[in-house]
């Protein structure tokens, strides 16, 4: 039996297999509201057969968007747009487990999309706004510094996360991932490179993780126990003086104690001085370090592309699930092909059951001989 295609429990949520579609920003909307692009995008990935599909980083406020084209969940219009996109996906794949990642970009907000260079949009420019962060330290040289969050500003961020989480519950998402990675606001609090506060929310790791944990606790308290909440973390900044694995492990332990159903381990994104040793599975060792420290499921991500590689990560106990992002944009049917290679079965719409190449045993659950 394939380890990759065995069930996994994330809190109250049972996944059919251990393949996760990681969040991927699309930069394809106006005013935060999903439209036709997301109907197609979410719909076709929902049919992939992955055990869990986490839709892209979704801003909890307009000022929390990375770019003006970011998906949001801070208005009734945003909620209605996502409802329409999810209706399409659920018609095509009614049993798919679809979760959402909620985030706030902090000092990395007010940026142009990657398709347009990704540079900061100054507050006085069209579509720009003043960003916020733990400390008034810009992300890149020459950028307009963010405003350091005061008590009222931090309270607003917490309230925005809670409201977006409540909207997520109304939309029927199977789980909620809080974005504490890739240099965005909650990660900015965790890293000593971006958090140089001298109050209770700065200093050592206990102080720096205080605000992210407050956000997590508020969301956990506002969401029914039937909906699991977990976090995505950057386990290292890959930069001198930045967040290191040992401190990230303390955050993992604190999140577990606060009720996190899982930990999704990534890295980097905070510093322009980062030096990342990119290669196949380059972040898996970080997930393994987290898995050795906590008793909740840990997801590994980062240039994992081959079925045998993913199978080995799970079978050898390096992580409990394997998450992929770009690999799914390249091959939206990755789980079908992996199941065929590993001798497993996967859910797929019956309309596609006859798609397997001639001579290949279709790996689809429910398919019977003679149906070709």
Image (cartoon, rainbow, N blue to C red):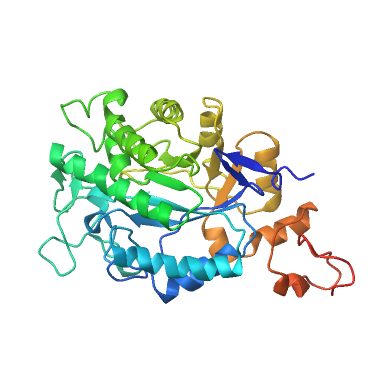
Percent of width and height locating residue 248: 41, 30
Front residue of 203 and 93: 93
Front residue of 150 and 98: 98
Q: Which residue extends farthest left?
A: 124
Percent of width and height locating residue 213: 33, 33
Give the vertical position of 282 relative to 290 (above or below).
below
Q: Which residue extends farthest right?
A: 370
Give the vertical position of 361 relative to 311 (above or below).
below
Residue under the image location 51 percent in, 37 percent down: 262
- Quadrant assignment, res 25: bottom left
Residue 280 visible, this angle: no
- Quadrant assignment, res 192: top left
Residue under the image location 13 percent in, 60 percent down: 123
Residue under the image location 59 percent in, 46 percent down: 322
Q: Quadrant of the N terminus?
A: top right
Q: Quadrant of the C terminus?
A: bottom right
Would residue 43 appear left or right of 206 to someone viewing this image? right
Would residue 313 appear left or right of 265 to someone viewing this image? right
Percent of width and height locating residue 135: 17, 39
Count of picture labels: 0
Percent of width and height locating residue 44: 56, 69
Would residue 295 appear left or right of 366 to someone viewing this image? left
Residue 37 visible, this angle: yes
- Quadrant assignment, res 297: top right
């Amino acid at each position: 039996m394939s380890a990759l295609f065995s069930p996994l429990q994330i809190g109250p949520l049972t996944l059919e297999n251990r393949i996760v579609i990681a969040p991927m920003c699309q930069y394809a909307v106006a005013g935060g509201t999903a439209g036709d692009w997301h109907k197609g995008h979410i719909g076709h990935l929902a049919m992939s057969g992955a055990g869990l599909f986490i839709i892209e980083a979704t801003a909890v406020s307009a000022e929390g968007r990375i770019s003006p084209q970011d998906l949001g969940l801070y208005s009734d219009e945003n909620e209605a747009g996502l409802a329409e996109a999810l209706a399409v996906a659920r018609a095509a794949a009614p049993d798919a487990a679809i979760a959402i990642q909620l985030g706030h970009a902090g000092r990395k907000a007010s940026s142009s999309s990657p398709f347009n260079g990704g540079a900061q949009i100054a507050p006085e420019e069209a579509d720009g706004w003043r960003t916020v962060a733990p400390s008034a330290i810009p992300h890149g040289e020459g950028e307009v510094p963010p405003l350091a969050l005061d008590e009222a500003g931090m309270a607003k961020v917490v309230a925005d996360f809670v409201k977006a989480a409540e909207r997520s519950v109304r939309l029927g998402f199977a789980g909620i991932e809080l974005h504490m990675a890739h240099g965005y606001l909650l990660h900015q609090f965790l890293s000593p490179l971006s958090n140089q506060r001298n109050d209770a929310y700065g200093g050592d790791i206990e102080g720096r993780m205080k605000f992210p944990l407050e956000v997590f606790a508020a969301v956990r308290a506002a969401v029914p126990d039937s909906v699991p909440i977990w976090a995505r973390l950057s386990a290292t900044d890959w930069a001198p003086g930045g967040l290191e694995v040992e401190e990230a492990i303390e955050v993992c332990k604190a999140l577990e104690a606060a009720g996190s159903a899982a930990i999704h381990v990534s890295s980097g994104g905070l510093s322009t001085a980062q030096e990342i040793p990119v290669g196949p599975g380059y972040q898996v060792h970080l997930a393994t370090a987290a898995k050795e420290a906590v008793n909740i499921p840990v997801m590994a991500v980062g240039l994992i592309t081959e079925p045998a590689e993913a199978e080995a990560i799970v079978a050898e106990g390096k992580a409990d699930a394997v998450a992929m992002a770009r690999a799914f944009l390249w091959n939206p049917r990755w789980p079908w092909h992996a199941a065929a290679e590993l001798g497993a079965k996967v859910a797929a719409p019956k309309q596609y059951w006859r798609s397997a190449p001639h001579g290949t045993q279709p790996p689809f659950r429910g398919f019977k001989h003679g149906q070709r």
